[in-house]
Image: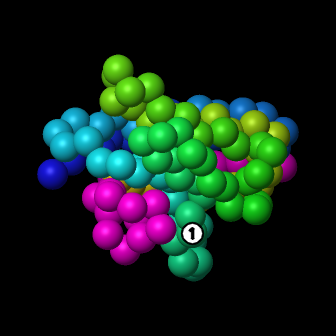
Amino acid sequence: QVQLVESGGGSAQAGGSLRLSCAASGYTYNCMGWFRQAPGTEREGVATIDSAGSTAYADSVKGRFTISKDNVKNTLYLQMNSLKPEDTAIYYCAAGPYCSSLSRRGYWGQGTQVTVSS
């Protein structure tokens, strides 16, 4: 099993930046990723990274967000630049064996709030 603890959320102005962190302990899974959920909407995938370093992004964040992982610290990051009000959501870190099924077969952190004002 794995324990995931997110940090780094907060408030930012549109056009600003935030960096989220997710400290993982316990079992190391092949895939880690970020998801988000805004009020009244379904949870959506933001970005994933596997043990080979391959990344994938939602179209809505491509070119603005960067996912990375420090394997020594076992910490996942999400650098968010050029933030938009529609990025406002609770952001969740997840870990699991396969990126293709991470949303269904992953372990989850408690979430961290990101609020972007215009």
- What x and y, as percent, mark residue 26? 17, 39
* Viewer-side residue, 97 vs 43: 97
Give coordinates of residue 72: x percent, y percent.
35, 20
Look at 42% across and 42% down and name the residue there.
Answer: 51
The answer to whether residue 79 is left or right of residue 100 is: right
x, y (%) of residue 90?
51, 57
Color encoding of the figure: rainbow
Q: Mark 1 points at which residue?
A: 44
Residue 9 in view of the camera: no
- Asked which secondary structure carries label 1, the reply is strand
State which quadrant residue 41 falls in: bottom right
Front in this rendered view, residue 30 or 59: 30
Is residue 23 at all visible to an observer of this figure? yes
Residue 101: in magenta span = yes
Please give left or right for residue 80 compared with residue 31 in the image: right
Q: Give the range drawn in magenta.
A: 96-118
